[in-house]
Structure formats: structure tokens, C-alpha cells
Amino acid sequence: MTRRIAAAVFSIATLTLSSTAQGQIRASERSTVSQTIDGTTITIDYGRPKTRGRTELWGNPLVVPWGKKWTPGANWATNIQVDKDITINGHALPEGHYSMWMEVKQDGWTAIFDPDARRFHLQGPSGDPNTIQFDVQPETVNWNTEVLTFSFPEVKATGSVLRFAWGHTQVDFDIGVKASRPIMIAADLAERYVGSYDFKVGEILGGSETIIEITYENERLVVRWPDAPLAPLKETWLQPLGEGMFHPVEITDGEILDIMTFVAVEFTPFDGKATGFEWRALGDELWAEATRLPY
Amino acid sequence: MSQHDTPSRRRFLTTVMGASLTLVAGPGNVSYLRGHRLGTQIDHPEPRPDVDASNVLSEAQLAGFDHLIDLYNGIREIPHVADGIRCMCGCAELPGFRSLLTCFESNGMAMSCEICQTEGRMVVRYHNEGRTLDQIRAAITARFG
């Protein structure tokens, strides 16, 4: 009888304990967020602590003391994985897997990307010589982010914004990716398209007729449209797609701002010296057409 | 928000962008200067020899979608071409979807998909310009591949 009771108690205890372990709620649950930009995928894996009414997070010895190299997350260090080389705030971050840390100081923070990805929060960064680090300026905002969050609030053809937010603080990282299709074109191909064109624009772009110039500079086709309705369209590059087709590329200060992937510039004929071109948008809608002017 | 994203630029982009094209990048070492996406390989289906337009939605079935009638009529004229083009919106991964022609048949995918519609209009236009099936395939691959 005693053995039967003991066995029953043991069974009940085992079942109870195992079900409790499987259903355990963690104080900082794990999360993953991922963003693909033009074929490059960035993934953040991190623990999500809560503020739980704590209004002072930074410089609080019980949360993140000043000078601490803290992983923006909980438990196992926040990880960032990139499947192709990217830039982050202009700094090269090669393809790979990194643990992420922030050195939290009163006069600014330092972001640290450590190639040793598997580290616990108590260990801090490894000091690996290939560590990438740079200063960032946290921003104080009016709203409270209760649960520590990573997100990608802005995505363009050429990059994204990665945002860290916790409490009333956020830090934005400017992510840059390599274009899956290069912008450059060989000189003999470019020669087909270079010239002056009589450009007629549909109502959606302001409805006008003007002369535009296509030139070949630094291995790129450059389109100059002085009367463009928007400043980024006054000078654009053409990203070659093949078959006489291009995407317009918005540029600013000589850098790519965005690639207008919803527009195709189609030259005719598609396989020879161009006599003109059309701007076609989604739905194959004709936005503009151009005729080459005689030399 | 980017410092370059002025209100007028945002309004312009919001007004004219109905949907985003998803371009699938591929690895490879084809000379980028020749204007080709690096190493893209798109497999367009072979048109079935006995294909016809009998399953393409009729005008009656397009009630309420008057803006698509001309497109469906255009595809109806060239089932043998549309059946040789891969649809690039992702529906090609679904069971039962064989070609761009399928998108305009009973399941009605092209009624709501802007990629199907754009691709369909391009195929009709290129065919009417006299391009061969291979030339049309190359243009679709260049645009969407």
C-alpha cells in the first residue's frame, strides 16, 4: 500500500513538474525579426525584457549602469545575422553572425558587433579583433515602448532603417545593401542610348514636353531632366535590366536614394540603336514617351 | 523617415505606387556591364500544343472589372503565347498554376494581382509589336526576374 501510494505521488509529481517546465513563461521572451532588402536578409534574434514601470533604465544600477557594455535584449546576447555584406551607419559589416552590444554612456552610446555570436549577457563582448564598433546617439521620444523591440520601420530598394526601442529611448541604424543589379553598363551598350530626346510626359508626372539628355559618365547612363516636377528626377541614373530596359534610379549628392522598381524605361528597338523610349509603370501604364532628336 | 523624403516626394510615391515589384536576385558571375542580373535563371513553360482560350474568363465573368476586359480579350487572342510565359508574382509555386495563361483562367488570379495584370499587358503589347515568344520571355525575365 505504502509503495503504491509512493508510486502514485511520484507519478503525479513528475507529470506536474514536466508540464510546468514546458509551460514556463519567461520574464523576457525570445523574438526574431527579419527583413529582406533587394536579396539581402538581415535577422535580429533577441530577448525582450519589459520596463515594468521602471522609468529610469539608463544609469540605473539595477537595469543598465553607466559604462556597461550591455546586450540590447536579455539572457543570450542579441544576435544580428546578415547573409551578404552590408553597411551599418556607413561602417562595413561583412556577411556573418554577430552578437550585438551597446556601451551605454551619459554622453552617447557605442554600438558593438562582435563576431562571437554565442555569448551570454553577463559575458559582455569578447574583444575579438574583428569587432566592429561605432558611436551612436540615442534619441528620447515621448512614447513608451514597454517591451524592448527591434523593427525595420523604413525599407527602400537600397537599404533600411533598423530601430531599437525600449522605454522612451530609440536608436536608429541606417542599413545599406549592395544592389542585386549593378547600375553600371558597358560603353558599347550605353552608346545605343546616349543622346537628346524630345520627352513627352503624361498627366501623372505633370503633363509637359521638354528636351532631356542621356549621357554616359563613370560607366553609368545619366538622364538630365531640368524641368522635372520633383528634384530627385532632375538627374537620375538608369539601372540596366537587359533587353533595352532600365529602372530609373533617384540619386542625391551622387549617391543612390532609391530605385524606382515600379517603373521600367523601355528603349525601342530593344536590340539596337535607340530611336526612343517609354516610361511604363505598374499595369504597363504609359507615363511618358520620348523620341530621339537628330544629331 | 529619411531627410530626403519631402512631403511632395511622399505624395508622389503614394499616388503612383500601387504595389511593389518583387525582384528575385540570383548569384552568378555574368558580366554586370552587359546589363543582366547576375545569374538569373527563369524557366518559362513550353506552351501546350493543344492549348486554347476556352478557360479564360469571359466578359460576363468580369462584371465589375470593366478595366480588365481589354486585357482578358488580349490574352484570349494569344493563349499559345501566354501559355509559354511564367507568371512572376509567385503563383507559379502554387499547385494548378502552369503559366501566365492560368492566371487569366477560372481561378481569377489576374483579377486582383497587379503583377499578373502588368505581365499580361506587356505580353499582349510585345506580341502585337511582332516579338517572338523567346523575345517576349527575355523581356519578361529582364523586367521581373
Image (cartoon, coloured by chain):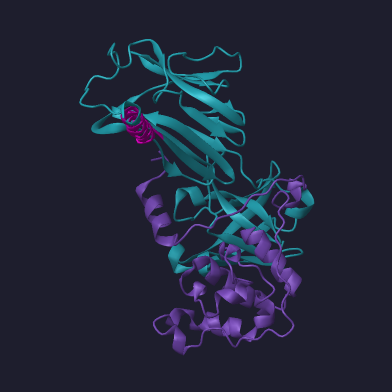
Chain colours: A cyan, B purple
Q: Is residue A268 above or below residue A176?
A: below
- Can residue A257 be seen in this snapshot? no
Q: Is residue B138 left or right of residue A35?
A: right
- What residue lies at 63% left-to-right and 65% top-to-bottom? A277
Q: Is residue B104 above or below residue A281?
A: below
* Type of secondary structure dominating the magenta stretch: helix
Query: Is residue A145 in the magenta section?
Result: no
Which image quadrant is residue A267 in?
bottom right
**Image coordinates for residue B56, horizontal then vertical, percent:** 56, 83
Q: Which residues are magenta?
A: A5-30
**Image coordinates for residue B103, horizontal then vertical, percent:** 56, 74
Which image quadrant is residue A15 in?
top left
Q: Is residue A54 above or below residue A173?
A: above
**Image coordinates for residue A7, horizontal then vertical, percent:** 36, 30
How many marks the image carries: the answer is: 0
- Can residue A151 be seen in this snapshot? yes
